[in-house]
């Protein structure tokens, strides 16, 4: 090709590459950096240890190999992916990685693609900031596992935890106890004072109850004013004592704005046996709780 045919295309490509918002670099067939854009050079200035710009002898593949030898997470995977690209065994690979910072941690997507360069085969690297997406994913993950109102694990999380602990119980023979807890007269609290008072009461109950538990116990909001408490490896006497403690700590009235509410609990509990399932264990605890609750009314407001 003559210069007149090549120059406009190359100039346009060079300008577009230079102005990319993604942090970008080009590697030759040995893995050495042969070109970088402005975003890459700025990132290198702000992050000590980042592979530097064109004009040095830095080999990105060797940087990855050294990082892998030092045990850095993901470095061996990236080095292997680059070698496959340079050998023509694949066309592209993606790798997500965290980038710790003194101010805020960020996440990047490394996208590496094979590409022809002036002297033969090469690789184009793009590092794209995906922090916003990762934060959104983490938020959704938390929302999927935790109750927004109380901050406790939710029903889904409770069911999975019980399943896990049942497996441990079958293996070790240690008992697993599940307590089903219901607030007495909670509907009347909502009816007389509004759902905002009821919501705050639930949040305060969760905090107060959590302070009485062992580190291995897990209190979950099962739905409405129902809570499930999972207690691995505790004796029946220990469960009875825990139930009494929960009632005791709930005896002091809760102050919610100008409203003072004293609330009682109905508690049922059940212990696992080798053939227990999540459903049979919860059903047994639930049945005992409702047996206790029938005909009782232990909520007063003043």
Image (cartoon, grey):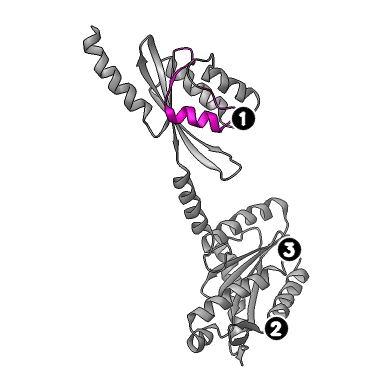
Q: Quadrant of residue 261?
A: bottom right
Q: Earlier in the sequence, mark 3 or mark 2?
A: 3
Determine the secondary structure under disc 3: loop
For the residue pair 156 and 200, the one nearer the viewer reads as 200
- Quadrant where the image shows the N terminus: top left
Mark 3 neighbour density, 10 Å: few (under 14) some (14–19) many (20 or more) = few
Q: Which mark is residue 252?
A: 2
Q: Earlier in the sequence, mark 1 or mark 3?
A: 1
Which portion, as a residue range, is magenta?
Answer: 29-52
Determine the secondary structure under disc 1: loop
Does 238 sit above or below residue 144? Answer: below
For the residue pair 213 and 165, the one nearer the viewer reads as 213
Direction left: furthest residue? 5
Name the spot of residue 103 as percent of width and height, x first.
58, 45
- Viewer-side label of 1, 3: 1
For the residue pair 74 and 292, the one nearer the viewer reads as 74
- Viewer-side label of 3, 2: 2
Direction bottom: furthest residue? 302
- Residue pictured at 39% horizontal, 34% vertical: 21
Name the spot of residue 110 as percent of width and height, x first.
46, 31
Q: Quadrant of residue 69?
A: top right
Residue under label 3, please give it.
Answer: 214
Q: CA distance from mark 2 to mark 1?
A: 53 Å
Does 135 sit above or below residue 246? Answer: above
Residue under label 1, please give it.
Answer: 72
Mark 1 neighbour density, 10 Å: few (under 14) some (14–19) many (20 or more) = few
- Residue 89, visible in the rendered structure: no
Q: Quadrant of residue 152?
A: bottom right
Mark 2 neighbour density, 10 Å: few (under 14) some (14–19) many (20 or more) = few
Q: CA distance from mark 3 to mark 2?
A: 21 Å
Determine the secondary structure under disc 2: loop
Name the spot of residue 200 as percent of width and height, x first.
56, 76
């Amino acid at each position: 090709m003559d210069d007149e045919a090549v120059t406009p295309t190359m100039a346009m490509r060079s300008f577009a590459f230079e102005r990319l918002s993604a942090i970008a670099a080009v590697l030759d067939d040995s893995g050495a950096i042969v070109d970088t854009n402005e975003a890459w050079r700025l990132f290198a200035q702000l992050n000590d240890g980042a592979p530097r710009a064109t004009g040095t002898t830095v080999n990105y593949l060797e940087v990855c190999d050294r990082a892998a030898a030092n045990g850095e997470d993901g470095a061996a995977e990236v080095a292997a992916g680059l070698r496959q690209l340079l050998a023509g065994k694949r066309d592209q690979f993606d790798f997500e990685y965290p980038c710790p910072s003194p101010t805020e941690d960020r996440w990047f997507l490394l996208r590496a693609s094979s590409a022809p360069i002036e002297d033969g085969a090469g690789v184009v690297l793009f590092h794209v900031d995906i922090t916003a997406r990762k934060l959104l994913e983490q938020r959704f993950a938390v929302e999927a596992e935790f109750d927004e109102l109380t901050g406790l694990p939710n029903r889904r999380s409770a069911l999975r935890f019980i399943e896990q602990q049942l497996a441990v119980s079958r293996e070790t023979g240690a008992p697993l106890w599940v307590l089903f807890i219901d607030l007495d007269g909670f509907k009347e609290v909502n009816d007389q004072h509004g759902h905002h008072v009821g919501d705050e009461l639930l949040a305060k109950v969760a905090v107060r109850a959590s302070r009485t538990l062992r580190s291995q116990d897990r209190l979950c909001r099962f739905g409405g004013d129902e809570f499930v408490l999972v207690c691995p490896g505790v004796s029946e006497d220990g469960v009875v004592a825990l139930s009494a403690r929960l009632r005791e700590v709930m005896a002091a009235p809760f102050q919610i704005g100008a409203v003072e509410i004293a609330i009682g609990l109905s508690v049922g509990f059940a212990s696992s046996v080798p053939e227990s399932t999540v459903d049979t264990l919860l059903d047994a605890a639930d049945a005992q709780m409702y047996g206790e609750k029938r005909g009782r009314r232990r909520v007063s407001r003043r």
